[in-house]
Image (cartoon, rainbow, N blue to C red):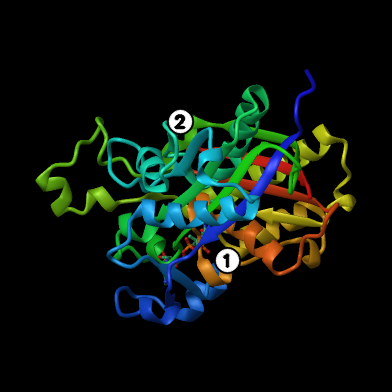
Amino acid sequence: MKRARTGILGLGAYVPERVMRNSEWAAWVDTTDEWIHSRTGISTRRIADPAQSTVDLAEAAARRALEDAGLGVDAIDEIIVATDTPEVFLPDTASYLQTRLGAREVPAFDMAGSGCAGFVFGLDIARSRAAVGNRCVLLVGVELLTRIMDWSDRATCVLFGDAAGAAVIGPGEPLAEVLACTAGTDGSRSAILCLETGGTRRPVTEEAVSRREHQNIVMNGREVFKEAVNRMSAASRQVLEDAGVAVGELALVVPHQANLRIIKAVQKNLGVGDETMFVNVQHYGNTGSASVPLALWEARAQGRIRSGDLVLLTAFGAGFHWAAALLRF
Ligand code: ACO
């Protein structure tokens, strides 16, 4: 039996309405617009309404991706949600999303704690699941990072924003073929970027909460910076090599939007021009696992991607996890 082609059938994204400017942070912490902008490239980020939770953002992005694919919710055979900011601790956000969408009783699971690499990492899994079982997989990257961080820690709070991105991966005439994927993990360095309180190692206690430990994202910014540049560059080279594609053939690189300086360093390592690098970190900050699908969706909406284009995705985050994928639209 001839297997149908599988690939990305549709894309969607959602950002909350509320725009928060750098200058607003000065009311909370000792910082300035100049510091944030010069160190990160970020000018604004979106903040979810207090009435919104993870599944609201995920649903909005998922419905747009289904619409883009021209598919109804009954077409979904599997749901994967990559998030570090779940709806609740147990069960996973994918269960809530399955019910909210009114999807069939299909397998649904989270890639919890997958960091900012979650979506691209999940794309590798989704395309295998789609190819093996002829399944239509809904993949969502969603974060309400502003909900879990410590708003008094200036070294981390100014970096993040809330958003969701989604893709439908399955058999059919693809919007984009997935030519190659790579992913990796180095758990030995997890202490450089982690949130320890809340699990079994450090359960949440009244005392821990009074010390704000449940929001204490530990981050060695400089180490994360170096790792992010090295891993995203290496993963990019890997997928290009695996697919037999030269860097000069790329129409667009869509990197994880953590920090403009990280993006520029990856750009330099790859040796591509400004026109080949997609950047929207200035508008949304670091939206974790939502960052790459949001950027890809926006790049397409802006007409930066045409049929036949080769587009490279690359991401890095807590774990450490990293991943890259090469797409042909
Ligand atoms: N406003 C003003 N000053 C600040 C702020 C702030 N918001 N945050 C930190 N500072 C201060 C520090 O306290 C420090 O002061 P000191 O010299 O008196 O100690 C000074 O600014 C310089 O701090 P550095 O850490 O040297 O600044 P750096 O240039 O390294 O930039 C940053 C920090 C932006 C965090 C950078 O290291 C970075 O982007 N790293 C990557 C981190 C990241 O992206 N994490 C996201 C999750 S992982 C991922 O998505 C890849």
**Is residue 128 visible in this depiction of the protein?**
yes
Q: Nearer the viewer, residue 256 or 119?
A: 119
Indicate left or right for 329 with 296 as reference.
right
Residue at 30 percent of width and 35 percent of height: 91
Q: Nearer the viewer, residue 74 or 182?
A: 74
Q: Which residue is mark 1?
A: 281
x and y percentages locating residue 147 in the rendered image: 32, 58
Indicate left or right for 46 with 235 as reference.
left
Mark found first going from the N terminus, 2 or 1: 2
Q: Residues within 10 Å of mark 1 (few under 14, many from 20)?
A: many
Quarter of the image that includes the N terminus: top right
Indicate left or right for 158 with 309 as reference.
left
Residue at 46 percent of width and 57 percent of height: 60
User: Could you say whether the residue bearing mark 1 is in a helix, strand or loop?
Assistant: helix
x and y percentages locating residue 27 in the rendered image: 30, 80
Q: Which residue is mark 2?
A: 106
Badge 1 amino acid: Val
- Tell which tag, 2 or 1, sits nearer the viewer: 2
Task: Residue at the far left: name it.
Answer: 206
| Quadrant of residue 307 within the rendered picture | bottom right
Question: Gap between marks 2 and 1, in whole Å?
Answer: 34 Å
x and y percentages locating residue 95 in the rendered image: 36, 38
